Image: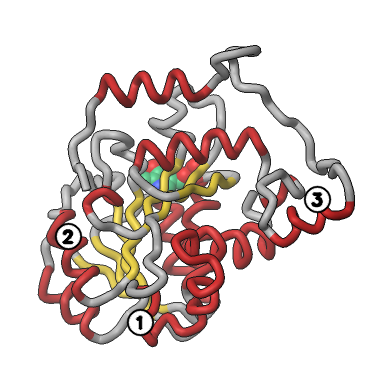
């Protein structure tokens, strides 16, 4: 996949896809929690996921949908899910994938909220962790070999500012079939971890993505899943296989929507 970014193309794409070419140029906001349906058949299709129309704002809203499609394109992902905050996106991703008894590998230093999520909250639910420096490849490889389910890191450590050799870590996680989540808050557009082979990218859109300090938000972007051959089909992810079977390349979307957005309400 192309790792380089054409800034003019992206600037144009983002500006022109936010609004509408015909009719109102600015994006139309949909401040609605509930949505009406044409008839019972349409409602059934929406509930079953075969009709792509809004169901209920906890599980999707057209305004969020606009943001999600733009950030997914920006990151080279197949889809994205917007959340209430950056911490909402971190919680969504970790709580939807990890189970009690799993172990998380944390590479580098973390933003304070993420550190507390991992060390206190996830630990309270029986999810253990270990931390290592960004260049401690012996530790990284031995943890991956042991069969852990998830690796978490920041593209640029906040506040440590340490820069990881991202491609080397991505390649290791792919070799050992382990989900890699990258908090790309510091480097939207400048770095595209999904195009480099990572599985999930998380942003606090409160920061560089919105840029004006007036809107709290978060978003997680994910890659396409291969229904025939994918690390999600590894036996250690057995409880996720049903999502791959049913949803194919959009399996991550289904996992997060069902297990976090719908059940926990991180909207
Ligand atoms: C701010 C920040 C978060 C948390 O985002 P909120 O929108 O404040 O919840 C997560 N990661 C990094 C790197 C951040 O800077």
- Label 1 CB-ligand 1 distance < 8 A: no
* Distance from Cα at disc 3 to Cα at disc 1: 36 Å
Which residue carries the number 1 mark?
Answer: 234
Q: Point out residue 50 in the picture as x, y percentages from the top left corner.
A: 67, 56
Disc 3 residue: CB within 8 Å of ligand 1: no
Between tags 3 and 1, which lies in front? 3
N-terminal of the pair, mark 3 or mark 1, is 3
Counting from the top left corner in percent of width and height, residue 56 is at: 76, 48
Q: Position of residue 163 (x, y in %)?
A: 16, 48
Q: Earlier in the sequence, mark 1 or mark 2?
A: 2
The 10 Å Cα crowd at callout 1, few under 14, some 14 to 19, many 20 or more, is some
For image coordinates 49% across by 64% down, the residue present is 251
SS for callout 3: helix
Please say if the residues under marks 1 and 2 sit with CB atoms less than 8 Å apart: no
Identity of the residue furthest to the front in this view? 41
113 to 67, vertically: above or below: below
Q: Is the residue indicated by label 2 positioned so its CB lies within 8 Å of ligand 1?
A: no
Query: Mark number for residue 223?
Result: none
Residue 205 versus residue 19: which sits nearer the camera?
19
Disc 2 crowd, CA 10 A, few/some/many (<14, 14-19, 20+): many
Looking at the image, which residue is at 82% across and 43% down?
A: 34
Q: Which mark is residue 134?
A: 2
**Residue picked out by circle 3:** 42
Residues at marks 3 and 1 touching, judged by CB atoms closer than 8 Å: no
The image quarter in which residue 264 lies = bottom right
Q: Residue at x 75, y 31 (%)?
A: 31
Q: Residue at point 30% right, 73% down?
A: 178
- 202 or 171: which is nearer to us? 171
The vertical placement of 189 against 109, above or below, is above
Q: Is residue 259 left or right of residue 190?
A: right
């Amino acid at each position: 996949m192309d790792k380089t970014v054409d800034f003019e193309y992206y600037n144009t794409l983002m500006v022109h896809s936010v609004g509408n070419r015909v009719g109102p140029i600015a994006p139309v906001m949909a401040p609605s929690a509930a949505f009406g349906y044409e008839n019972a058949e349409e409602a059934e299709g929406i509930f079953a996921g075969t009709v792509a129309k809004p169901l209920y704002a906890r599980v999707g809203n057209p305004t969020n949908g606009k943001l999600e499609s733009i950030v997914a394109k920006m990151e080279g992902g197949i889809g994205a899910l917007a959340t209430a905050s950056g911490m909402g996106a971190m919680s969504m991703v970790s709580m939807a994938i990890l189970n009690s008894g799993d172990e998380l590998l944390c590479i580098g230093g973390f933003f304070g909220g993420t550190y507390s999520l991992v060390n206190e909250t996830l630990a309270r639910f029986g999810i253990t962790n270990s931390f290592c420096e960004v260049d401690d490849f012996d530790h990284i490889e031995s943890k991956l070999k042991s069969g852990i389910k998830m690796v978490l890191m920041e593209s640029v450590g906040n506040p440590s500012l340490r820069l990881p050799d991202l491609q080397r870590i991505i390649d290791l996680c792919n070799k050992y079939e382990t989900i890699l989540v990258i908090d790309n808050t510091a480097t939207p557009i400048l770095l595209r971890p999904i195009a480099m082979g990572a599985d999930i990218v998380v942003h606090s859109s409160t920061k560089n993505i919105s840029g004006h300090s007036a809107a709290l938000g978060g978003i997680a972007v994910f890659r396409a899943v291969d229904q025939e051959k994918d690390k999600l089909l590894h036996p250690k992810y057995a409880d996720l296989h049903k999502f791959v079977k049913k949803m194919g390349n959009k399996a991550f979307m289904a996992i997060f929507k069902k297990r976090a957005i719908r059940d926990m309400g991180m909207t």
